[in-house]
Image (tube, coloured by chain):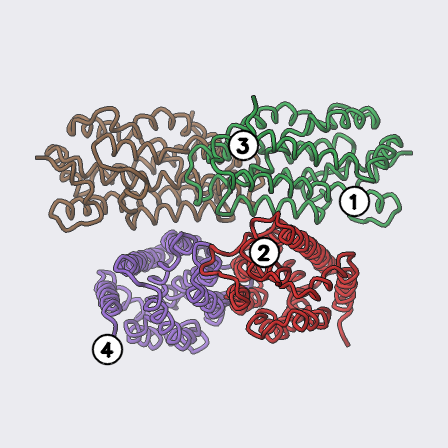
Chain colours: A green, B brown, C red, D purple
Amino acid sequence: MKDIHLQKLDSLISKEWQGIFNLKMAPKVYKIIKMKDKRLYAIYMTQVYHYAYYTPRSLALAGANLANEDTRLMHHFLEHALEENGHDMMAFNDLKAMGVPLKTREDMPAVLPSTEKMIAYVKHLSLSREPYRSLGYHYWIEQPYEYIEQFMHSLCEGLHLEESQFLFYKNHKRIDKKHGNDVQSILLNYCKTEQQWEAIYQVTQTTLRQFVQMIIEITEEYEKLKNGSSSQFRILNVLKPE
Amino acid sequence: MKDIHLQKLDSLISKEWQGIFNLKMAPKVYKIIKMKDKRLYAIYMTQVYHYAYYTPRSLALAGANLANEDTRLMHHFLEHALEENGHDMMAFNDLKAMGVPLKTREDMPAVLPSTEKMIAYVKHLSLSREPYRSLGYHYWIEQPYEYIEQFMHSLCEGLHLEESQFLFYKNHKRIDKKHGNDVQSILLNYCKTEQQWEAIYQVTQTTLRQFVQMIIEITEEYEKLKNGSSSQFRILNVLKPE
Amino acid sequence: MKDIHLQKLDSLISKEWQGIFNLKMAPKVYKIIKMKDKRLYAIYMTQVYHYAYYTPRSLALAGANLANEDTRLMHHFLEHALEENGHDMMAFNDLKAMGVPLKTREDMPAVLPSTEKMIAYVKHLSLSREPYRSLGYHYWIEQPYEYIEQFMHSLCEGLHLEESQFLFYKNHKRIDKKHGNDVQSILLNYCKTEQQWEAIYQVTQTTLRQFVQMIIEITEEYEKLKNGSSSQFRILNVLKPE
Amino acid sequence: MKDIHLQKLDSLISKEWQGIFNLKMAPKVYKIIKMKDKRLYAIYMTQVYHYAYYTPRSLALAGANLANEDTRLMHHFLEHALEENGHDMMAFNDLKAMGVPLKTREDMPAVLPSTEKMIAYVKHLSLSREPYRSLGYHYWIEQPYEYIEQFMHSLCEGLHLEESQFLFYKNHKRIDKKHGNDVQSILLNYCKTEQQWEAIYQVTQTTLRQFVQMIIEITEEYEKLKNGSSSQFRILNVLKPE
């Protein structure tokens, strides 16, 4: 049977995901998919690129953190950093495969404030005196499949995405199963006190809610792009449905 | 046939190692071994502990370095960090197996200035705008076997070391073969200009000469310990030959 | 006449502050003040302590940032760091003067997630390739007086705060006038392109909205404390009105 | 009367300086001065440029160090960082005033290994758990006048240096008197145990000896430049005596 702390963590995550699918903009998202406008998905992928750029780096900083002398936790951070390395380029290539004219990293549209806040927060946890807390983020972000599987299916079908255009998602699904198990093991191994578990719950909730902010901001940017008032994502207009 | 830059690198390393074995204190070291005094080896292992503590951390910092966007170089740093993780505890356990009463990391004698300068220099390279330069250090320090094999044999024989007392060396020998090849590949893959190779030669020479300083300082500390004027390595006196 | 970019910045800040005073929880705050319950103000001061702890450190990191070679910007960061040093202890002492039994930093209630996100974001900007962006935060947080003067007056009157209990605010008011001017000068000196000003506007807005999150979370924590379900701020219950 | 620890520190520094003036290359240096060859001084100034570039940054990192919660020590680091800011450009301008065709920082000849080791070591101390140790470096490097006054006089006279060509030295002499006193005060205020003073002595000795390495390497580079085998300092050949 599952550990009681993991159970509590899972139910917390489940509740937050439900909140995400109940957001008042959710129907709008489905409508956009129905209209076969790939630009919303593309804006999302630009932000995935940005946070995926930092993921292995923050994990490496957590691994290098002198405040941690637990060899097993350090091993987890370093192994995970290694496995996440280069995934920014998966997002880059998905966008390219969709037809976005990206040549170098400089062509990538900028990071949005809510994405940058997520990056900043995870990096801060990694550099802090308690880098283990960052596990509260890695735990849910690497096994969202239970919650988003159906949505991703609708998305791919709806937008007629070819496999080469959602490799980031597809490859991650494979890799993240292992990660999910790894994070579970290290959480159970490392967290010995209620206070530590409370810190994990808090980070999980804080980052999931930050993720909601990202989704909202991405949708707002899509509206701006659609009505012509956005300049920073203009490069994605090649994907505009006829 | 070997690449011309690697050849030059190897001959530079070979020359520096010859210099090490021709140091005027070399005969003294052999004499100490003959006297079956394990304390010199033990002081050396305390310093190995300290730099091995930083090795995976510096590699992780090089991996996290935002100035590097070469995914392959980043992969090398992270993989290598992972492989070097925990080796400080190998040195710790070798000392324990010899009979040094170490319980926690706090019991370990302090880092010596020349060791700390080595640690600082490698860390600085890892954090700098050109983290690839640190490869000039990792290249030689992870494949010294050609040069020290015979010496290590004399040492183990002379001091009657049991296998459990030189696991750091033994395990590294196995692992480092792979590392050595990895560093060769990444050097050939990454270094495209003469200037980059010059930077590698310079770091190789600088760190090998810093290693000489470490050896000299360790020998001086042994003399102090022997004549009773050292306090910081006192814990090693349990190894004093009768 | 004021520079057009600063004008735009000021009107953006003004609009966000209006939003803050129009928050639906604003009347509730005034009611709490009327009830002479100092605990809301005290929770706020614990969070001031936490971000004030990081302010000079983030400024110092911005000053140390190798990506910046503009001596004048570096001067600004370092001078400002120096001037903000120790202000965490002002907040600490205000709480003590109110009667909160704080002996050491360890007694201070923990940082809240929204405060920690603010700290993380400012630190991230300071460590990033464009540390000048952090000016978008320092600009408004150091000259809020125009907007909060009246509120602070009501607060002090309402809660019968003695001078020794709001020294953080009082001393800052004096110091921050200078800072405000300094940040204006450095902004005008450093920002040469529209893109740079856009980055400043974005950071200003992002951090002001994060500040709103902090205020909301602090009010929620007050409610928890009042109804007895908070454990982390229990130490503030000495301030409970009879 | 001077504190006993400062006395010991001063006598240690005095002894190391004597060693510097007794180096076997010392007469050679005087001979170069006599030959009115400014290139040795110029190579030295290129290295001053490099370490002066890092001095305020390392001090700022020490100030930002989360392991230090002593407000007074933090104040010292930040104030000192502020005062040292921009001194790299003094060295830059001294070289320019001598006629070296430097336009941007990119034109500056590269850092030498021994200089980079010094930079790395001081930075490592600043980032370590005991940043106060870096005071052992700042103490002597900022008040060398007692020891080098006479030498600098010979140098200026011998090379017919105009005032605009040794402003780094001249301005520092004025500023550093204050710094010297500041470092004394903070050392006396902060160091409470013999162990801390021992750490200071060790850093002082280690950095002074590293300084000797710098001097030796600079002289070697001068020889290479003179006999035409140096490429990295070629830009200084405009100073070659006729």
The residue that mark 4 highlights is D1
> What's the chain of the residue with tag 3?
A
- How many angstroms separate mark 2 from mark 3 (CA)? 26 Å
Whether label 1 touches label 3, CB < 8 Å: no
Q: Seen from this angle, which residue lies furthest front?
A: C242
Q: Nearer the viewer, mark 1 or mark 3?
A: 3
Position of the N terminus of chain C by quadrant: bottom right
Q: How many residues crowd mark 2 within 10 Å: few (<14), some (14–19), many (20+)?
A: many
Whether label 1 touches label 2, CB < 8 Å: no
- How many angstroms separate mark 2 from mark 4 (CA)? 44 Å
| Same-subunit check for callouts 2 and 3 | no
Counting residues from the start of the chain, the first of labels 1 and 3 encountered is 3
- How many angstroms separate mark 4 from mark 3 (CA)? 59 Å
**Does residue A134 appear in the picture of this structure?**
yes
Whether label 4 touches label 1, CB < 8 Å: no
Residue D236 located left or right of residue B16: right
The residue that mark 3 highlights is A80
Q: At numbered mark 1, what does the secondary structure look like: helix, strand or loop? A: loop
The residue that mark 2 highlights is C126
